[in-house]
Image (cartoon, rainbow, N blue to C red):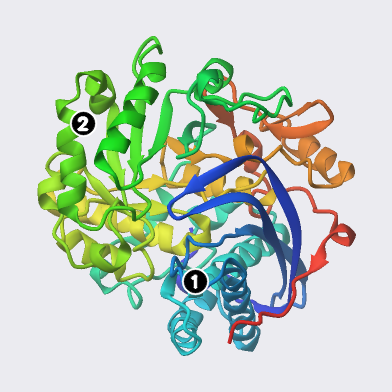
Amino acid sequence: MASVSEAPRLRVRAVEFYEWPYSLRLPFRFGAITVTHGRQVVARARIELPDGRGAWGVGAEALAAKWFDKDPAVSDDDNLDQLRLALEIAAAHYRSHPQLSAFGHFAAAYAPQLEAGRQHRLNPLVASYGPAMLDRCILDALGKLLGKSFYDLIGQNLAGVAPEALAPDLKGFDISGFLAGLRPQPSLHVRHTVGMLDPITAADQTAGSRVYDGLPETLEEIVATYRQRYFKLKVGGDVARDVARLSAIAGVLDRIEGPYHATLDGNEQYLDAAGVLALWTAIEREPALRRLKDAVLFIEQPIKRQAAATQDVAALAAKRPVIIDESDGDLAAFPLARALGYEGVSSKNCKGLYKSLINRARCIHWNRQEGRDRYFMSAEDLTTLPGICVQQDLALVSLLGLTHVERNGHHFINGMSGRPRSEQQAFLAAHPGLYRDADGVVRLMIVDGRVDITSLDCAGFAVAAEPDWPSLQPMPRAAWA
């Protein structure tokens, strides 16, 4: 294992951003927005080692409206431009750095990136989007140069992870020992998301709304096709409506033989902890929800972020653990949430892989201090499209030791249908256990509710294929100022 001082130093010589548009096969509602289409950013950065060797690394992520910033006064197009600006700011920071370790670039940019975000009215979640993308590109390039996988880079600490200056609560924690102890898994359970508009049975589909593309559309069909055991259920902030919808969902899930597991996602739709506690009390009182109630593992960010950072959730957490997601804006967020009774935090590559590693270390550290397994991480989705994006996220989730991950891109988006056929085939050839070719489209392959990710143990950051660069559009300059 390399010491922090032995981690390779590198310069970021060039950064490029591209985009491409995609359409959803089914509309998806989360929080305050219904999504029917979107855009994905594909980034690449070229690094150079002291001996002159260089390589390009890649990363990809959806540009998402009304998740990073839910201010109704900000338009969806402005939301996208906020994220573009975060990328531009990060690129300028990283290119200006001297030779640093991969983590050193993240650490050097952390405070300046947040400060630049404040100056441009970007909240910490938006501002963090830029480094989150570039850190992936850097590790992908470094892994290619060294012939090391993402798992090797992190496990041997070739990234130079040293978080004490950014996370003083980890002072004295053996970070190298923690990283060396991480073990990737060969497969993960897929936790299917049931959005607020999603039909539960065929009776819920209005005339003419069915897609008829050969893929499952209703929850009933999804369960029969993918045979999943993990589900993420969206709730909308109205107790009576939420209980009625959960009862309809339970009518399908309760048919599953053997145990199933669920999480509740409030997407900031409840005003306060008392409202969420009222929802849980109503769930407890509803006979139709007896089995589903027992299946709930945790509740995800039910309270609007402005209130979530100030309200004690201990009474709710006594019923089920509560995690932060949208409130996880900077590295101080999880310790602050812990003081309010939150016991978990989500991992999302769009928030930053080093943030996930630091928060996972915190869970281990705090649990040792308390002598029990109280604090935990979950793996959540932000429309991770097949290809670079989903692969890098799955690799991170696997290394963190999480056993199930929310995945919805394979359901709401028609596989890699928006990409050139040559690109689809390249990813299929590189990851034959992760994808399948059906009806001329390469799609995520889910077998008995799991995805096989053994092929992600490859040089670089879990990619092993290249996008069709000429088919991508240069990212436009951000108009947000």
Residue 481: assigned label: none
Q: Residue 399: give x, y in percent of width and height.
A: 48, 46
What amino acid is labelled 2 in the image? Ile
Residue at position x 62%, y 45% from top?
A: 391
Residue at position x 41%, y 13% from top?
A: 256
Q: Is residue 303 above or below residue 71?
A: above
Taking depth in this image into account, of 70 and 5 the one nearest to the observer is: 70
**Left or right of residue 243: residue 148:** right
| Circles 2 and 1 in contact, beta carbons < 8 Å | no
**Residue 124 seen in the current view:** yes
Q: Secondary structure at mark 1?
A: helix
Question: Which quadrant of the view contains residue 443?
Answer: top right
Q: Earlier in the sequence, mark 2 or mark 1?
A: 1
**Left or right of residue 320: residue 410:** right
Dot 1, crowdedness within 10 Å: few (<14), some or many (≥20)? Answer: many
Residue 283: assigned label: 2
Q: Identify the residue under disc 1.
A: 126
Q: Residue 413: give x, y in percent of width and height.
A: 66, 41
